[in-house]
Image (tube, rainbow, N blue to C red):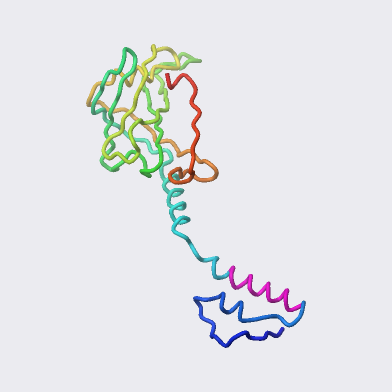
């Protein structure tokens, strides 16, 4: 394999392009070798490069993994009755954490426990029943989070909402942070889309 230099400019590590275009193959066989050589050079130069965007994506993934199954006690700070059967509850974030989750840009979901439930199938009592709630407070809020809870009549297999609405201020409840929802491979949502369409449905929004 032989090349004819177009100029005598010296190759520098920071300028692979100057080196690639300083060579021209003499025949058709040289063309294939030249393309292969250029591909290896460019691939080697970019393989170890990590952009800020990719580093941020990796950080979001690590935060999501770290938030799986974090159970803790949450103290009720304030309770506001919104209607006959619904209330706004403000819970304290444990002192070991500033925010409820591990990433201030990702929504957090909690599974709240009712320790005095009744099994719907066997009738066993007491059993721990759980229900998931999405906080209405922003995930970046420090020191507390808020839930809007609807109170349903207590019956076998249910009663979590009634338990939370009747929880005295100052008492604590056990909650478990659920794993972040993964969409298209990663949990990151901030800055991923230019336009977002929402479709709402179900009895929960009533």
- For the record, the magenta segment spans 29-43
Residue 204 locus on image (x, y percent): 44, 21
Query: In the rendered view of the protein, which quadrant contains the N terminus?
Result: bottom right
Q: Is residue 116 magenta?
A: no
- Which residue occupies 51% across, 78% down? 13
Q: How many marks?
A: 0
Q: Residue furthest front?
A: 6
Q: Nearer the viewer, residue 39 or 18?
A: 18
Left or right placement of residue 97 versus residue 69 in this view: left
Q: Is residue 42 magenta?
A: yes
Left or right placement of residue 47 versus residue 206 in this view: right
Query: In the rendered view of the protein, which quadrant contains the C terminus?
Result: top left
Residue 58 locus on image (x, y percent): 46, 53
Quadrant in the rendering for residue 132? top left
Q: Residue furthest right?
A: 28
Q: Nearer the viewer, residue 71 or 164?
A: 164
| Magenta residues, dominant SS class | helix
Residue 168 locus on image (x, y percent): 24, 21
Residue 38 locus on image (x, y percent): 63, 73
Left or right placement of residue 9 versus residue 68 in this view: right
Q: Nearer the viewer, residue 17 or 85?
A: 17
- Which residue occupies 31% across, 27% down? 173
- Which residue occupies 49% across, 43% down? 193
| Residue 1 vertical placement versus 61 (above, below) | below
| Residue 86 vertical placement versus 132 (above, below) | above
Q: Residue furthest bottom?
A: 8
Quadrant in the rendering for residue 180? top left
| Residue 96 vertical placement versus 23 (above, below) | above
- Which residue occupies 71% across, 80% down? 25
């Amino acid at each position: 394999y032989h090349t004819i230099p177009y100029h005598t400019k010296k190759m520098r590590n920071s300028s692979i392009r100057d080196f690639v275009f300083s060579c021209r193959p003499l025949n058709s066989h040289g063309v294939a070798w030249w393309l292969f050589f250029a591909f290896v050079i460019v691939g080697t130069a970019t393989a170890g490069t990590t952009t800020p965007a990719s580093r941020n994506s990796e950080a979001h993934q690590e935060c999501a993994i770290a938030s799986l199954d974090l159970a803790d006690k949450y103290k009720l700070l304030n309770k506001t009755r919104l209607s006959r059967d619904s209330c706004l509850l403000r819970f304290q974030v444990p002192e070991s954490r500033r925010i409820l989750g591990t990433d201030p840009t990702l929504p957090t979901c909690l599974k709240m426990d009712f320790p005095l439930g009744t099994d719907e199938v066997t009738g066993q009592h007491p059993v721990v029943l759980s229900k998931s709630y999405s906080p209405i407070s922003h995930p970046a809020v420090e020191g507390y989070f808020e839930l809007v809870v609807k109170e349903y009549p207590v019956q076998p297999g249910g009663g979590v909402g009634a338990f939370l609405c009747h929880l005295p201020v100052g008492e604590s409840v056990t909650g478990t942070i659920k794993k972040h929802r993964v969409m298209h491979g990663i949990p990151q949502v901030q800055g991923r889309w230019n336009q977002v369409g929402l479709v709402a449905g179900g009895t929960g929004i009533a």
